[in-house]
Amino acid sequence: MPVYSMTGYASVQHSPLPADGEAPASAAPTARLGLEIRSVNSRFLDLSFRLPEELRQLEPGLRELITRQIKRGKVEVRASQDAGDGATLQAPNHQALQKIAALQGKVQDWLPGARALSVADVLRMTAGSSGQAAPDEAAWMQLATQAVDALRDARAREGARLTEMLQGHITQLRGLAELAVPLVPQLVEQQRQRFLERWKDAMALADGSHLPEAAQDRALTEATAFAIRIDVAEELTRLRSHLDELSRLLDKGGDIGKRLDFLIQELHREANTLGSKSAVLEMTRISVDMKVLIEQMREQVQNIE
């Protein structure tokens, strides 16, 4: 199953034709249908519809269709219906005009400053009164299905690019973890040698001829305490485990955005602990490089469904 980004765009248009595929020259022009869907990242599924009044009845069907296919993201749907060139306006019937005029008179009696209706207002209000056909719901739902499929394809392509980037960062983090593994034993040994040298210097000042066994035991104790304090084996083990789980989820695909976000938080925690236990510049540099990579991953994971 592919990984889907929450960012995508799709636009489809359709001009209905008769069953034989050709409209006769004498036939009235058919309306052009247009549907545009765009989505960006969001914690939940947030749908908004920008539909003209004559298409408002399509919203429940569009909402149900999108909800079945898309799980997360802020999705905006725009629909338009263009009558096309050469289309004739339908004259409103007399009953509708009389009713609008009466309503306007009543409103202006109560609100003398109210603006009079324009011709465009009247035509819009009487759009369904002259025998004009209702929107073809079947054609619109077919168009919506094409648009949602195109949006999912766009989100899948973006998701594939995000997956490639994340897998590359996972590989880099694994490399940094491997660089950190041999540093701890080296640091412990360096600390033990430094303590022995300081003890030797102290014994030399006290005219001691040799290093007593107690000094060696003390050096071993100091080195052990230091090793416990700077030991990052547990952090590195957990970090590698989180990276394996991230890679597995990316290979699996599907609805994984929230789980990826949780794992990124855990990676941040391990990298911070690694930095706090750092005793040498090299370990600090590794920790900083890890944090930079993890932050880049966090920004991209927030775009995954």
Image (cartoon, rainbow, N blue to C red):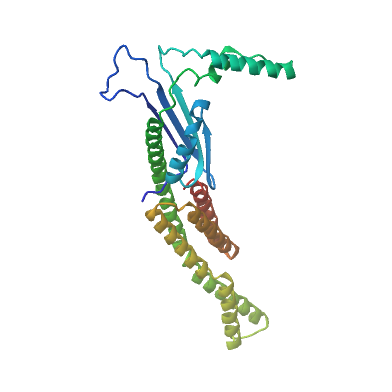
Q: Position of residue 90 (x, y in %)?
A: 46, 14
In this view, the residue in front, 33 or 8, is 33
Asked if residue 166 shows in the view, the reply is yes
In this view, the residue in front, 59 or 153, is 59
**Residue sitting at x 45%, y 23%:** 81
In this view, the residue in front, 208 or 221, is 221
Based on the displayed image, in which of its 4 quarters is residue 102 positioned? top right
Q: Note whether 140 is above or below 300 in the view shown.
A: above
Residue that sits furthest to the front in the current view: 95
Q: Note whether 10 is above or below 217 in the view shown.
A: above
Q: Where is residue 260 in the image (x, y as percent from the top left)?
A: 48, 55
Q: Where is residue 163 in the image (x, y as percent from the top left)?
A: 41, 49
Based on the displayed image, in which of its 4 quarters is residue 226 positioned? bottom right
**Residue sitting at x 37%, y 40%:** 153
Asked if residue 281 shows in the view, the reply is no
Q: Note whether 278 is above or below 294 in the view shown.
A: below
Disc tally is 0
Q: Note whether 101 is above or below 244 in the view shown.
A: above
